[in-house]
Each structure stands twice: as C-alpha cells, then as structure tokens.
Image: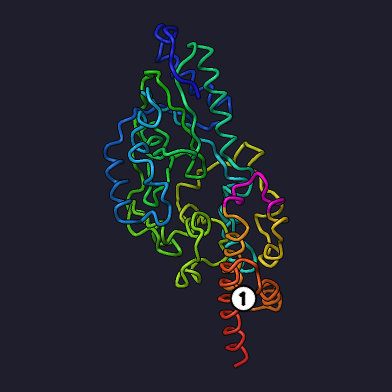
Amino acid sequence: MQTGSTPSAAGVDLVALAARIKGWATELGFAKAGIAGIELEEDEARLLEWLRQGRHGSMDYMASHGRKRSRPAELQPGTLRVISARMDYFPCDPDADVAWATLHDSERAYIARYALGRDYHKLIRNRLQKLADRIAAETGPFGYRAFADSAPVLEKALARNAGLGWIGKHTLLLDRDAGSWFFIGELYTDLPLPVDKPASAHCGSCTRCIEVCPTQAITGPYQLDARRCIAYLTIESKDAIPEELRPLIGNRVFGCDDCQLACPWNKFAQPTREEAFAPRHGLEGAKLAELFAWTESDFLTKTEGMPIRRAGYAGFSRNVAVALGNAPPSRQVLDALHARADDPSPMVREHVAWALAVQERRHATRRG
C-alpha cells in the first residue's frame, strides 16, 4: 500500500498508461484487466437490502464496515479508480465431466475447484503489487492499495464496471470468453485513468444455475440466500449444519460448484496457466473415509497454504461426517464414523451421531 502521489503523474498520458497497465497485467499472469470508476450506488442499495433480510447469515463482517464496501474512497481515501484484474483457476481441462463424475461418486469427496491448489490471496496480491511497481516506474509514486478478497470490496460490481464480465443469475461474475472459473483482484488508485465500458449481461432466459442448486440457495435470478448456500455452510459457518440441509449437501465437503458446472458459458473456460493452482495431495477425488481418518496434524500438514485451511479441522470434519452420512451404506463408512464417535469436538460428535443414525436406518431398510 502506498498513499499520496507526486506531480510526476500529472504529466503522464493516462490513456496510453491505461493500455500499458492492461498489457502489464497480462504479462504478470492475469487473464484480463480493466478500469472502473467508484460509483456503486445501485449496488450499495442491493447490498443493504440483502443485509436487512439477514441473508448473510453469520457473516457479520459483511455489515461491520458500514458503507466502506460500496464506497471505495471511504475504504482507501483518495481512490479515484479501481483496476480490476482476473486470474483463471480451473486446474485442468475445463470439461465439466470430471467434476460431475466426482459429484456422482458418493464415496468420494467433492472440493470446490478453486480450493484444490494454493491459496490465491497472497498470490494475487503479490501480482497486483508487481503491477503497482510497474505503474510507479512510469508515473512516479502514486496512491494505491491492493486487494484480493481480503477487505470490504464489492469486487464483482467493480469488475463488471471494469468490463471483466457481468453478474450472472447465480450472483457470480461471467465472461463470454472465459465463463466464471476465475479469481478477481483489485488495485485501488488515485490515478484518474480513463474507465472501461461496463460489461453487458448475457444470461438471457437461461435458469440452469437456479435449477441445479442442491439447496435452492439461489432463490431467484440474482438472489442468493447464503444461509442455504453449501459454500457458506461448509466454509463460512462455524455452527452445526441444519439437519434439513444435510442430505442435500451430498458429498460436497468444501464449497460447491454446481451452478458453475451447469452454466453454458463455462464451455468457453480455459485451464489456468498457474501451476500454483494445480490440485494437491490427490484431493480432486479423495475417498471420504480416508479424509475422515485424518488427524488434526494431518489436516494442518496436507492443507498448508490451501484455501481448505479456512474451514478448520473441526469444520472440515463436520463436513466429511455429513458426506459420510449421505454415502452408500458400507462397512468402510460405518467403521470411519464409529472411529470418531467420541471426537473431542461436540460439533463433530453431533454430526457423526447424525450420520450413524442415517446409515443404521439404511442398513435396517436393506435387511428388512
């Protein structure tokens, strides 16, 4: 982060600089970059209504910063523009068949594709810092601050305004040439750069994302109730998963990609060029029973530097216990659950007890 600019920036051709910034972003590994203004009044109104309805669940941080999330200049004084940059993360051939195959294999764990490799936060911030360094070499010192899902930022709205894509009916950002398998980062700046044209929407009459959502968390076009969203339930929430939602979670133990897998625009997605996002430890198709046998030490070792660490050992175990409860009856599943029936975590114990009860009912039905 740097604050304050010098008169050297005043003599720069800002139109040419904006073009160079986009080129530098590509050289640094971003798939695309654009520039937005900081006016977000309509998006602020939608955010406040979403919060008023309580759809953020226990994510109190969504409301704890006042209006800084929708007013960039209040978060970073002096901000005039936002450079928004996109980095693709799909770890292999974007053909969704492999991901769907894992979802349909109830003995295996499904982990959201973004979480299979290295955590993106530091990587993207480091690249944005390098971008800022290149800009400073051209303009002299200037005011900026880099973000990568690390502060109260309306990143999708800013990215839309920067021309990186439109916000789809599932509330994720979509690009006609890249689908939605990408991360977004921002560089708030006091440089009065020319802004790009906002992206237009191209969802049309399609409602596949709404129809495929396992828990009906997408309550209507552009409407998401986080309290029902599997990503919220398995990552953000530190509480027990509501019993009525547990059967709907299936084998999803960290996040959910169904709305992206079903989206027709993702047929245009490209595999990432970032080796850091390649799957680690075979987690793209790990057996549930194997994951549930992990000790806390195993969890910390095998998720080091990965987004999965965010769930914590108890939270991840809670999620796997639910998935085991949803798995086909087998001796391996029962043994895995019984092995942790007396887990030190009350939350894990409760979810194990639920899973065992479900499995025992299934066994009784089969015997009958």
| Residue matched to label 1 | 328
Splitting the image into 4 quarters, where does residue 195 fall? top left
Q: Residue furthest bottom?
A: 368
SS majority, magenta: helix
Splitting the image into 4 quarters, where does residue 366 fall? bottom right
Residue in view at x 52 percent, y 21 percent = 132
Looking at the rendering, the stretch of residues picked out in magenta corresponds to 300-310
| Label 1: how many Cα within 10 Å (few below 14, some 14–19, many 20+) | some
Q: Is residue 306 magenta?
A: yes
Q: Is mark 1 on a helix, strand or loop?
A: loop
Splitting the image into 4 quarters, where does residue 82 fall? top left
Residue in view at x 40 percent, y 28 percent = 76
Q: Is residue 235 positioned above or below 108 on the image?
A: above
Q: Is residue 73 positioned above or below 275 on the image?
A: above
Report x, y in % for residue 128: 53, 28
- Residue nearest the observer in this picture, 193 or 244: 244
Horizontal side, residue 345 vs residue 74: left or right: right
Q: What residue type is labelled 1?
A: Pro
- Residue nearest the observer in this picture, 116 or 1: 1
- Residue nearest the observer in this picture, 239 or 134: 239
Report x, y in % for residue 214: 46, 64
